[in-house]
Image: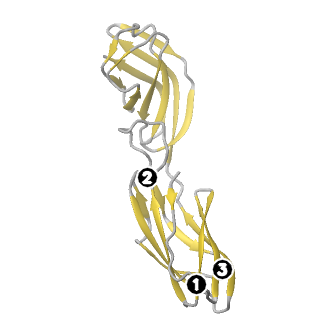
Amino acid sequence: MFHIGSLFRNKGKGRINITSVKINYMGAVHELEGLSTNDKEFDIRIPFKNRISSEMGDNVKKPDLRIDSISVNEPFELLHVSPELPISLPYGDSIMLVIKIKAPSLSYSGPLFLNMQVRSPELVHIVISTLRISMAGRSKELPIKRDIYIVKSDVFKQEVDLAGVVNSGESVNAIKASPPFEVSNTLPPLPFTLQEGQKISIFIKAPNYNYAGPLELEIS
């Protein structure tokens, strides 16, 4: 989902021996190397990059990664996080998280647990009963029965069989979705020539409110 690494200083023997740093983020635990220190306070530096994998094309917006808050398990105490939270990291961007930790007063040997919290995104409920496709006076209607919850204005994929509306060997230059939807991208990318038996993947931007009804696609 994302790349996360660690850069520590002061790795010699110390009163505090952190065997590993375990980071809980979005339901997955990422384990990093530890450190040793005699300091009462120390920094953990975490290079953090949004490199979410996706089948969507390059011109489809990938999700941002958010960190709304960070906590640390006892016996440690979180003092400060830089940059200041919350942060939102666009796809492909990277930052350096600097987390200042207060060490326990007694000697300690074992892991350090960090928890990165993300507020639940706002979802919309999309119910699509039929798919209507039209081009140059030809049209067809398909009962697709889509019922999904999706983040506001996020993109979902819809596979479409254009046969009966677009002839094999015919060019498709543009695909427009009826409001409140927008076409973000297609696979194959526009323009393309339809091959016999070929299904098209259309990436559609959802509205920022609930919707129930048909999805209409106009092809030219």
Q: Residues within 10 Å of mark 1 (few under 14, many from 20)?
A: few
Indicate the quadrant where residue 205 lies.
top left
**What residue is pinned by disc 1?**
12
Label 2 secondary element: loop
Q: Is the C-beta separation of discs 1 and 3 under 8 Å?
A: no
Residue at the front extreme? 12
**Who comes first in sequence, dot 1 or dot 2?**
1
**What residue is pinned by disc 2?**
64
What colour-coding does the image apply? secondary structure
**Who comes first in sequence, dot 3 or dot 2?**
2
Residue type of the residue flagged with mark 2? Asp
Q: Residues within 10 Å of mark 2 (few under 14, many from 20)?
A: some
Residue type of the residue flagged with mark 1? Gly
Residue type of the residue flagged with mark 3? Glu
- Which tag is nearer the camera, tag 1 or tag 2? 1
Q: Tell me the distance, in whole angstroms, between the alpha carbons under discs 1 and 3.
A: 23 Å
**What residue is pinned by disc 3?**
74
Q: Tell me the distance, in whole angstroms, between the alpha carbons under discs 3 and 2.
A: 30 Å
Q: Position of residue 45 (x, y in %)?
A: 48, 73
Residue occupying the point 39% across, 21% down: 217
